[in-house]
Amino acid sequence: MSNHIQITPSILNADFANLQSEIARIGNSDWIHVDVMDNHFVPNLTFGPSMVEALSRATEIPLDAHLMIADADRHAPAYVEAGAKSVTFHVEASSAPIRTAREIRSKGARASMALRPATPIEPYEELIPELDMVLIMTVEPGFGGQKFLDLCLPKIRTARSYIEKHGGECWLQVDGGVSLETIERCAEAGADVFVAGSAVYSVEDPDQMVNDLRAAAAAVSHS
Ligand code: DX5
Ligand code: ZN
């Protein structure tokens, strides 16, 4: 089992007019999660590669780009070129996930594949060696501040068992409704990388929340 707990705050709920100072408030983060939305794959619109490029110049913390966009095979490489150190595409938006994962890796970033809550993990077990991370969404993607879906917990467990079967190298990320109230459930089920948006940016001291989330997950995670 993995014991490398990482916290990756999402800037989706940060103040977009002041992103430089908003990022400075989460200096304890392992990664910064950047939610890319195209108004097609999800009903919301955020950033493109030029914003990722600007953010990568504004911080030393590596960027974790979560692409909630259609035609992921075509667009994912541009986010590696923009400076993201991890690029996550949705399997539902990809017709060639193996080729896309290999392209992300060959360009020098970690390759990650995301599943919406209703997408089963079983058909993708054999893809795990091609991936550096699997993202199990725990809300329907598109917006911050939604309620955590407990129905995703069995899928996190299954994904963890597949990852262990394939050597345990791949990270397992959860995203959506992760907070001090829900992070222990995710860690217990086997997640080791935790995205948190509103939980981090709704408090006075986001950096303290990053530490509190990490401690809560570490307390229950398997070693
Ligand atoms: C949702 C995004 C998430 C979002 C999480 O579609 O992918 O990264 O920012 O926000 P919270 O933690 O508020 O659910
Ligand atoms: Zn996300």
Image: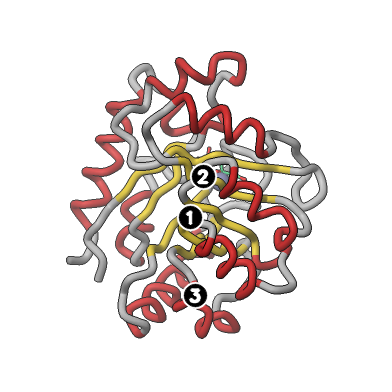
Determine whether the residue tagged by mark 1 lies in a helix, strand or loop.
loop
Residue at screen point 51% across, 44% down: 84
What is the spatial separation of the Cα atoms under label 1 and label 2, in whole angstroms?
Answer: 7 Å
Kind of residue at disc 2: Ala
The tag earlier along the polypeptide, 2 or 3, is 2
Q: CA distance from mark 2 to mark 3?
A: 18 Å
Is residue 188 placed above or below 81 in the rendered structure?
Answer: below
Q: Can you tell which mark lies on residue 109?
A: 1
Number of the label disc, if any, that sits on residue 84: 2
Q: Residue at x 59, y 65 (%)?
A: 103
- Which amino acid type corresponds to the residue marked 3 in the rendered image? Glu
Are the residues tagged 1 and 2 within 8 Å (C-beta)? yes
Q: Residues within 10 Å of mark 2 (few under 14, many from 20)?
A: many
The structure residue drawn at horizontal position 37% and vertical position 61%, both measured from the top left corner, is 191
SS at mark 2?
Answer: loop
Q: Which residue is mark 3?
A: 130
**Most foreground residue, 181 or 21:** 21
User: Left or right of 148: which side holds 194?
Assistant: left
Q: Is mark 3 within 8 Å of ligand 2?
A: no
Q: Position of residue 33 (x, y in %)?
A: 49, 41
